[in-house]
Amino acid sequence: MTTPFHHEPGAVPPPQCPAHNLDIGPGGLRRLYGPEAENNPAGLYDKLRAEHGTVAPVLLHGDVPAWLVLGHSENLHLTRTPSQFSRDSRRWRALQDGSVAPDHPLAPIFTWQPVCVFADGAKHERQRGAVTDSMERIDTRGVRRHINRFSNRLVNDFCEKGTADLVSQFAEHLPMMVMCAIFGMPEEYDERLVQAARDMTRGTETAVASNAHIVAVLTRLVERRRAEPAHDFASWLVEHPATMTDIEVVEHLRLILIAAYESTANLIANVLRMVLTDPRFRARLSGGHMTVPEAVEQTLWDEPPFTAVFGRWAVGDTELGGQQIKAGDALLVGIAPANTDPSVRPDLGADMGGNRAHLAFSGGPHECPGQDIGRAIADVGVDALLMRLPDLELGVGESELRWVGNIMSRHLVELPVMFAPSPQQKLDADPLSVMARTPRPADAWEISSPARTVPE
């Protein structure tokens, strides 16, 4: 294994050095951004695994060093041991020594905020408890009905044309429509909010401005709910006995909105692509042998909506995967490479039906608390689309499909389809009102995720 991080960030390699390759940076370390990372992340993971094992040194934007954890068991240890690997980004040595500036392209992702995702211990438990308790108040049946209605509303926009792009006209809009309804701000749903949410995780020059737009929208929502509570997720956070401040509520809403939107939009697009291109899926779905939820679960293994999560920061000097990790080092949870780790998945073509050991929703105390809602949006949305347009076919050759990637995710640019034109469907006028279960007493809240009811 190589000795990582022996260079200074930004150092220029000598002439004719292989490091002049766009995918290789100072010290001969591979970049987790740029052409290869965006176009062939699986190939990059294979190279890193062959060169370094289960934990590999990489470079982030600006050639800032970090560790990418590739192994399944190593990722579980990383996510389940906050005493060694903290979520508090203020521990990052690159921030402390000025190597990473406040306007860094990834700043919206790693800049510390007063939210549970950047907290450990008691503070994390208090804030996470407010989130999970509020999520338990969501009426899943009511939400699924709204997902179905929103899906059919989107299909109505293109069903008479016989062609559509299922990314820009369906997958990128359905999650935002649902989350705006759950939050209690359906009137804020528009194209600008969709694009701002997409832009934030791409590490673009406009990511900071996109973040500011979303924060402004959510700030207005929290101010309204302080004055006029309603039966929605924003009100439940505002009124929760954890007594979160307005800033805490806004930042938690932002965190949930972006995570839910990005992951679910990618998941829907990936499921639809596999249904349209993989013979195993289309044949079994049409033959009734595979349900849409089963197709979703297989997709979570093969094409997880988040390829990696940034980040964790070493509390002290330690060892992981045979690598010497220094205090203040940054680490990324490698979701996609963990899902293809040969030690847990030697045959990538094997059917993973019924196996939920994937890390698509991360793990440990920071495991995604809204994964059931994400699954519901994908399940109901894809099912509604296929019910309306059962003869869907890919409109271009599979080799013509293009992806855009970043360190966190990889998503389809377009998914053109053809189908027999069909009439619009009349939608019911049910208002966005049935989102909450029967209210529980004000003191019936708990710090950790409430136990699920076990059916008899």
Image: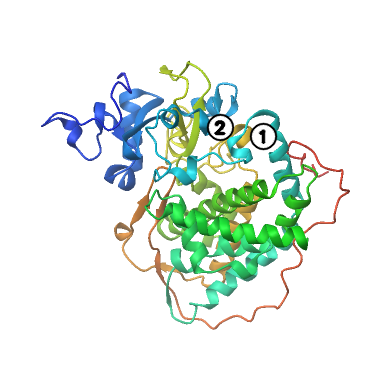
| SS at mark 1 in the image | helix
Residue 231 appearing in the image: no
Which residue is found at the position 58% from the left and 34% from the top?
363
In the image, farthest residue toward the left: 16
Q: Tell me the crowding category of disc 1: few under 14, some 14 to 19, or many 20 or more residues within 10 angstroms, Cα based.
A: many
Which residue is found at the position 45% from the left and 30% from the top?
331
Tell me, for residue 87, which label it has, or none: 2
Dot 2 and dot 1 residues touching (CB under 8 Å): yes
For the residue pair 139 and 232, the one nearer the viewer reads as 232
In the picture shown, does residue 68 fall above or below 406? Answer: above
**Residue 65, picture quadrant:** top left
Amino acid at pointer 1 = His
Amino acid at pointer 2 = Arg
Image location of residue 273, percent across then percent down: 43, 58
In the picture shown, does residue 198 fall above or below 319? Answer: below
| SS at mark 2 in the image | loop
In the picture shown, does residue 366 fall above or below 325? Answer: below
Image location of residue 45, percent across then percent down: 35, 35
Rendered-image quadrant of the N terminus? top left
Image location of residue 332, percent across then percent down: 46, 33
Q: Tell me the crowding category of disc 2: few under 14, some 14 to 19, or many 20 or more residues within 10 angstroms, Cα based.
A: many
Image location of residue 280, percent across then percent down: 45, 52
For the residue pair 428 and 117, the one nearer the viewer reads as 117
Which residue is found at the position 51% from the left and 70% from the top?
390
Q: Earlier in the sequence, mark 2 or mark 1?
A: 2
Q: How many marks?
A: 2
Tell me, for residue 313, which label it has, or none: none
Residue 125 appearing in the image: yes
Give the spatial CA distance, label 2 vs label 1.
10 Å
Rendered-image quadrant of the C terminus? top right
Tell me, for residue 124, which label it has, or none: 1
